[in-house]
Amino acid sequence: MTDLEAALRRAVRGEVGFDVTSRALTTMDASNYRRVPLGVVAPRDADDVAAVLEVCRERGVPVVARGGGTSIAGQATGTGVVLDFTRHMNRLVGIDSEARTAVVQPGLVLDRLQQAAAPHGLRFGPDPSTHSRCTLGGMIGNNSCGSHSVAWGTTADSVRELTVLTARGRRLRLGREWAGAPDGLRGLVDGDLARLRTGFPDLPRRISGYALDALLPENGADVARSFCGSEGTLGVLTEAVLRLVEPPRARALAVLGYADEAGAAEAAAGLLPLGPLTVEGMAVDLVPSTEGLPRGGAWLFVETGGDTGAEARARAEAVVRAADVVDALVVTDPAGQRTLWRIREDASGTATRMPGGSEAWPGWEDCAVPPARLGGYLRDFRRLLTAHGLRGTPYGHFGDGCIHVRIDFDLLADAGVARFRRFSEELADVVVAHGGSLSGEHGDGQARAELLPRMYGEETVALFERAKAVWDPDDLLNPGMLVRPAPLDTNLRFSVLPREPVDVEFGYPADGGDFSAAVRRCVGVAKCRTTSVSGSGVMCPSFRATGDEAHSTRGRARLLHEMLAGELVTDGWRSTEVRDALDLCLSCKGCRSDCPVEVDMATYKAEFLHHHYEGRRRPAAHYAMGWLPVWLRWAARTRTAPVVNALASVRPLAAVAKRLGGIAGEREVPRLAGETFGRWWRGRRRVAAGDGDLVVLWPDTFTEHLSPSVGRAAVRVLEAAGLRVALPPTLRGRGVIGDGTSRSALSLLAARRGRVCCGLTYVSTGQLDRARAVMRRTLDLMTPVLETSAPVVVLEPSCAAALRTDLPELLHDDPRAARLAERVLTFAEVLERHAPDWTPPAVNLPAVGQTHCHQHAVLGDAADRRLREAAGLTGELSGGCCGLAGNFGFEEGHYEVSAACAEDQLLPAVREAPDGAVVLADGYSCRTQLDQLAGVRGRHLAEVLAEGLERERRG
């Protein structure tokens, strides 16, 4: 243990982390930069903060304050001690509804403040797109803004008082009229009044540099406002008094279509006199689909408010009349507005990929110019991009003249880095020529601080350095930010990654087969750190259960990044730090759809486990549950299911079996079906074949051995819909679909018997060699199916997702894999596409439950929604993950997290269900979790419809 670590452990009550994982999780924020800290401290209170500052001051160690780690300019990274305020100093101290103020600690997430203020009819005005995970301390440090800044301003406009600790331990309470000013600050201002009155651009989004002009007497000598945007370089915030605003009771959204981006930009300033709440803009190159948007090549999103819906709509319609548009629409439905706003909020992630899939990066994320000059600035900006051979997709706060953009810099090659510097210098000059600010929201950090002399001049920047010395004479706090900065092209996080492709098993088609590129996808926007999900969202259940960054998608990606870098995590694929972080990943695949940059941690986990255990003994659960299809087939062949069930019901025997198999002691061993689905199929009386399409019903392991009732119900419904149902061949050769026989005696002798399997259990446990062998056998069996046009109906969502994604990505060298993946349909999809005229039975009941996480992430549930609606099943299914997630919830050590995930969404939804409600759960894991944790029977949609058909038959 180092002297610094030992001293900190003695001095503070909060956690002190100098281990590899703690440091690796904080090497990066959401910027292009990377710095390795000495350690991380999670202070419990202001006394802890003071103790950290004292210990570090004595040793000359820098201190960096960090909130949600979503900063885009590098200011939340450092080489000393990082203060993590999100773990303990994250409380809402109180709300005074009459004074319209809130007292908060720096680690409080903005959405938690909004939720607490809403019952009082109040809210915090600024709302950056990261509102679900950014902290108030970080917002104050960066002077964050958001889409409603045209109405409610920046964070500085909403700050009343700030309590801070200086690097030398003074506790100051900052406010107006020089309240809390450190010694020497007033003299510095009085000595340079002329410069402060003339040297700062007058525009709503001037975030660059120190806000020293807030200290002018005509501005109230507001020390708290001047502190905003100082990026943790002047003092450490421990508490803040914030002003709240009263939002309108109703809102409407006018979406205005323009021919191009410049036209939209030039129109934005003219709409400000109408008093909108937002004027946001984006062009067609950012939008994945223009469905639901008015005609045009660019759009303004203009939100209006009122006491009533009619008043808000009238104001939106007035905006449309005042705007010279190609097309427009007004949206008053809250759900419709949320759908449109989601496009804008996800832009910080979606903009990281160009249409062709190439990467794009921040650095010139948020320049701002006077709104009236935005059109001209954008034209100059586009010309500069073209001159440098670069591409970017601008969007942002057009009403404030603030533009966000990510640009496809090649930050992996020396020539690309050199171009990054040249472009940055030239664009800084363009911004200044238009009277703008290098930063309009996210701060300067390392990305822009070096260029501040171009905006302010050398003398004003020297004044900034003197101000920093007044507050922090020892240069202890976040050195290298704002003043005396590191060059903008150093400390790039990509420089430590391997230049040659890493040898991997999956194909990573979206990343050119490059695992490093796949890991680079995580840019740190941290949508995975949200504490609640909306709608059918899933990501990231383990973070919501633990609150630990290591168990977020971003945290795991950071550890994989450091594993590839080899500086902190030095043992590569054998890393125990990476293994432990991935251990609580449920492989729910939620990040594949919910992450704006489509990080696929389930695949990365399978890849890692494959290499980590290659040539080594695996955990017992990998053998017990990874090989589950084999054990279940043996039980079926030997007809020992009743014996297995009987033995499992004897608690001492079950306990021993669970301990040997690495299964959580709290779990009940599921019962095996007395009759498998396949045996029922072979012995059933065939119904008269209809003249509908032939469909091949996939007998997945769970349906075959554990829930054959689902398969029986699906056959009943599919045949009622007029479809001809067959099962896959069981002979490798040129078998006839469904009957397991051969066309000739010779081929029968040459054929080998087998069962299809998607390989899911082998993939989820990282046994990729075995998964590949199982998948190839399956493709051999399915060859005759692939020679027809028959779709493959898969009832278990996780198996369908494995066939759609894992199969072609693991067997990327076998064209049959892609052909089979294209054939896979869900139960609802096959009915919709191949029996479009069939009318389902009228069930007419409320439905609750949870959309399967793999269905949400990979398959989509639109067809299921339409089928439920047609059957009269009302209500919305919840999001999240059930927490069992195949083998995850059964593995020893996972029970508590598994149960916590179920309590996040699924179990509350079931407990609050109306009387008579149908509990839908298409996944076997979901049904098992409901049964074991709530004693509730969940049913597959096929079972519900089959029961409805039976009721109709009985009249």
Image: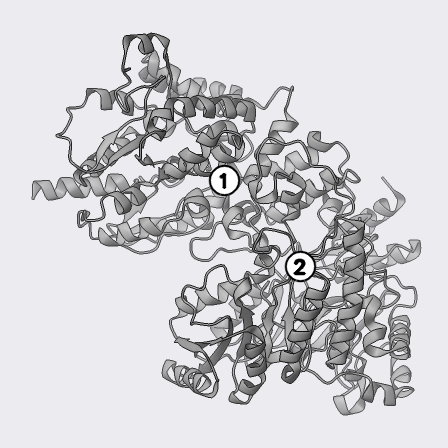
Q: Nearer the viewer, residue 296 or 459?
A: 296
Inspect the image, locate mark 2, and give the three-letter code of the amino acid beneath it.
Thr
Q: Residue furthest left?
A: 955
Q: Residues within 10 Å of mark 2 (few under 14, many from 20)?
A: many
Contact, mark 2 vs mark 1 (Cβ under 8 Å): no
| 432, 925: nearer the viewer | 432
Q: Is residue 197 above or below residue 32?
A: below
Residue 881 in view, yes or no: no
* Nearer to me, 854 or 38: 854
Point 44% across, 30% down: residue = 816
- Along the horizontal axis of the image, is 72 left or right of 96? right
Q: CA distance from mark 2 to mark 1?
A: 28 Å
- Left or right of 198? Residue 151 is left
Quadrant in the rendering for residue 419 = bottom right
**Could you tell me which residue is drawn at 15 percent across and 35 percent down?**
690
> Residue 262: x percent and y percent?
59, 76
Residue 417, position as x, y percentages in the image: 78, 55
Q: Disc number at residue 898? A: 1
Give x and y (percent) for residue 916: 24, 50
Q: Which residue is mark 2?
A: 70
The N terminus, quarter of image: top right
What kind of element bears circle 1?
helix
For discs 2 and 1, the disc positioned in front in the rendered view: 2
Image quadrant in which you'd find residue 111: bottom right
Relative height, residue 745 to residue 528 (above, below): above
What residue type is disc 1 on?
Ser
Give the structural element (helix, strand or loop) at label 2.
loop
Quick one: which residue is furthest to the bottom in this view? 218
Q: Residue placed at 32% from the left, 22% from the top?
A: 729
Above/below status of 900 relative to 454: above
